[in-house]
Amino acid sequence: EALFHLISVIFDDPEVQQLFLKLYSKEWSDGQVTEYILPTFSDYFADVKMFVEERSFRRFVEACLEETIVLFIDHLLSQKNYIKEITIERMREDEEAIIEAFREYVSVNKVESKVRVLTDMRELASANSVDAFALIYTNVLEHQPDCPPEVVERLVALREAIPRKDAKEIVQECKEIYENSLINGNPPKPGFVFPRVKCLSASKGYDYLWRKLT
């Protein structure tokens, strides 16, 4: 469909790609990335809206929102910087900014339900103990049943202050929680995010953190 070709045009725009590459960098922390991505989208949306009927336009914007969320999570999990307090605060501000930007085109309930996964990732990224990770990951699986334990592995690896012993325990605990949540070996329902997160599909199994810890 032509509209979905347009999504590729937007996300393949070199300027947009450059901005996404700066996510979770110092520039991002300083408010110089998300604040440029969202107005760029608005410019594109204004152009597209002139040529398509309302329902198709809303579907198009929703698809752009989903792709945005996937990219934010992909960059979060594949970044090279440790997650600090400023990272968490900036993530919170991003959630608010994304909701504010997209609610102009799509119902706020729909936007908030899709952005919920970013909130889940922020809460998981800010957990400070084995119990906290286990509790938050259990809650995350209620919203995102296909969120694999490798997400926890990657977030734990980005937390400098978590001791190795605790990190191993966190990963093992969350792996068990995930496996216990499966129905006939599969998540209860697929979501729109994790199958599309490149850094997850590119890595093999759960050896990402174990190599780092052992």
Image: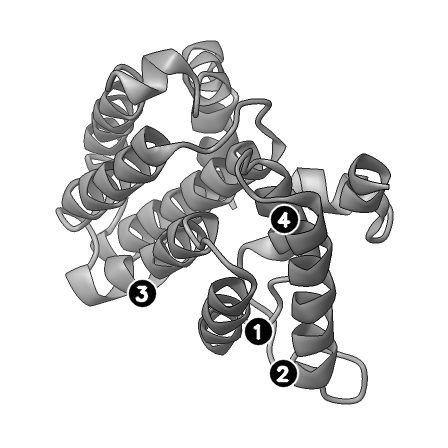
The alpha-carbon separation of the residues under discs 4 and 3 comes to 18 Å
Label 2 element class: loop
Work out whether mark 4 precedes mark 3 in sequence or the reverse, and give the earlier one. 3
Label 4 element class: helix
Q: Badge 3: how crowded within 10 Å, few (<14), some, or many (20+)?
A: few
Q: Quadrant of residue 6?
A: top left
Work out whether mark 3 precedes mark 1 in sequence or the reverse, and give the earlier one. 3
Residue assigned mark 1 = 145
Q: In this image, 148 relative to 79: left or right?
A: right
Q: Is the C-beta separation of discs 4 and 2 under 8 Å?
A: no
Q: Is the C-beta separation of discs 2 and 1 under 8 Å?
A: yes
The alpha-carbon separation of the residues under discs 3 and 2 comes to 18 Å
Q: Which amino acid lies under the numbered mark 3 shown in the image of this protein?
A: Ser
Q: Is the C-beta separation of discs 3 and 1 under 8 Å?
A: no
The alpha-carbon separation of the residues under discs 1 and 4 comes to 15 Å
Residue assigned mark 3 = 113
- Horizontal and vertical percent for residue 10? 43, 26
Residue assigned mark 2 = 188
Residue in the image at 13% along x and 46% along y = 104
Q: Is the C-beta separation of discs 1 and 4 under 8 Å?
A: no
Q: Is residue 147 above or below residue 49?
A: below
Q: Nearer the viewer, mark 1 or mark 4?
A: 1
Residue assigned mark 4 = 196
